[in-house]
Image: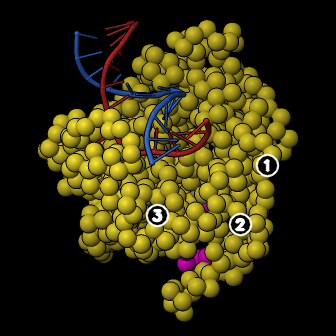
Chain colours: A yellow, B blue, C red
Amino acid sequence: MGTRNRRKTDPEIVFARDTDSELSSSEEEEEEEEDNRPLSESEEEDEAVKNGGKIELEKNKAKGKAPITVKLIKKVCKVCKQPGHEAGFKGATYIDCPMKPCFLCKMPGHTTMSCPYRVAIDHGILPTSHRNTKNPIDFVFKRQLQPRIPLIKPKYVIPDQVHCAVIRYHSRRVTCLEFHPTKNNILLSGDKKGQIGVWDFAKVYEKNVYGNIHSVQVNNMRFSPTNDDMVYSASSDGTVCYTDLETGISSTLLNLNPDGWQGRSSWKMLYGMDINSEKGVVLAADNFGFLHMIDHRTNDNMGEPILIHKQGSKVVGLDCNPVQPELLLSCGNDHFARIWDMRKLQPRASLSDLAHKRVVNSAYFSPSSGTKILTTCQDNRIRIWDSIFGNLDSPSREIVHSHDFNRHLTPFKAEWDPKDTSESVIVVGRYISENYNGAALHPIDFIDSSNGQLVAEVMDPNITTITPVNKLHPRDDVLASGSSRSLFIWRPQEKTEMAEEEKKDRKIIICSGDSKKKGKKQKRCSDDEDDDDDGMFSSKGKNIKVNKSQGKTTKSTRKTKS
DNA sequence: AGCCTATGGTGCC
DNA sequence: TGGCACCCCTAGGC
């Protein structure tokens, strides 16, 4: 049976919006109608205003209003304020200001549209030459250079279809995600408000949000290596907490602000965190450049903090090497990622300093061998060092990729796939939008880090927000995403189509739980089709994935008028 | 529909 | 070194 036919019989994924948002289903219908009817009067006027501005006067006259200003609206670029051109969205396509450097590669002289690093051209359709062009010679060549690459590359399946989701799971944007080390269907999520969510995405409606652990954003979470139910979390409130997920009971292991708020300049925040289970140490780094250590067995603070980055700069990432327990990788706002020997942790004693052009959002050792390094930098480049034993002066590769810093977004972090033994596939959200059949969507990119090729771009017409937080499951073909306040679980489409049971699961309707709203407590929507559908929208052409099929876009999606 | 805002990093002085 | 203006694709609330 072909995909097309199967689609019809597929159960629909239905998302439930916050019931407080008064977008009724009737509004949806109106939206649909709009596509087919001719431009309304007001739309025509809008168009006219855009195209010249003369109509402004008539419009006001016609409505009997006194014209307030009678002047031509001069077209001015909203970015550079210069006349002669315009920047911004034209439908679902963003037109760059030609006066600014390229938004993607940051080089002057061209715009994003004509950027040589732009993989997706011609409205998002990838040139075939850029996709899956693995030939045997390529492999032979690589194997000579990199003996660690397995002989046969495992067939890679992309989790490209939304399997389930909780819209507005958190009350603020998601900042970090973590899969449970043993329970396959448990996803941990932290948010900007300091809340930690525990979600069983197999029983979709089973979620728990702990709001009393941290007072501001959670930056990192790690499960205890010795007790699956216990979680360490580092937060901008300057604490590391140790929480029992069953009971929600939490204890503070480290508090960098024991005297409370003394002003912005002295308030300490904890960002990077990791656990060295070999050494029994919880490592956490603050926004002043210091590393703090907690004895994992006694949960006691271990001595004085150590300056590991430029004094006064934020250390956003820590990563312990999976193979060599002595190795620690850190990165931060001083534009460096640094490799450390755990036995010799002292200021300026790093084994290596990996220079970047801007702030380094994340730095990770490769998950199996621990010999590669992957970093995400705010200069819109993903960098890969193929071997920590080789020359580390410059990265082995730089991949230009749109993941700009924006103060309103959780910083993007490219992550390894822990299941990929060849240590090549990475996942990272994309900032820049693409016009996918009239909808401006921000895909999640799967990139082959060994050659920079885009393996897949994954998106769903219902996800109109940027998805900076992504985590691949350590054992299953599952991707978890945090986009704004919502969580998504993706699975491979081929797999979902095979299993009848899974199909049934997929039907589950997911509801939001906006903790701020009273009287609209999280409701569990049943699998029944005839359930109260107030404020819901269904996702008809749900999966666009690589070869962009049609997709009905939702109301909020930026659309092109045709 | 459109205005407002939270508030990080940078570069310039 | 510190203060400050500036910043291109936000998201959600009012």
Identified by mark 3, the residue type is Val
Q: Position of residue A313 (x, y in %)?
A: 45, 21
Instruction: Quickly name the residue at label 1.
Output: A521
Q: Which mark is residue A458?
A: 3
Q: Which mark is residue A542?
A: none
Seen from the viewer's position, the closer of residues A80 and A341 is: A80
Seen from the viewer's position, the closer of residues A132 and A530 is: A530
Q: Which mark is residue A533?
A: 2
Kindly indicate whether the residue at mark 2 contacts the one at mark 1 (C-beta within 8 angstroms): no
Q: Is residue A357 visible?
A: yes
User: Given this view, does label 2 or label 3 mark the residue nearer the observer?
Assistant: 2
Disc with the residue nearer the chain's start (1 vs 2): 1
Seen from the viewer's position, the closer of residues A515 and A449 is: A515
Can you say whether A135 is above or below A403 in the image?
below
Can you say whether A8 is above or below A376 in the image?
below
Q: CA distance from mark 3 to mark 1?
A: 32 Å
Q: Position of residue A244 (x, y in %)?
A: 81, 39
Range of magenta residues: A489-496
Image quadrant occupied by the N terminus of chain A: bottom right
Q: CA distance from mark 1 to mark 2?
A: 16 Å
Q: Residue at x 34, y 69 (%)?
A: A562
Q: Secondary structure at mark 2?
A: loop
| Classed neighbour count for the residue bearing mark 3: other residues with Cα under 10 Å, few (<14), some (14–19), many (≥20) | many
Disc with the residue nearer the chain's start (2 vs 3): 3
| Classed neighbour count for the residue bearing mark 1: other residues with Cα under 10 Å, few (<14), some (14–19), many (≥20) | some
Q: Is residue A452 left or right of residue A343?
A: left
Can you say whether A237 is above or below A150 in the image?
above
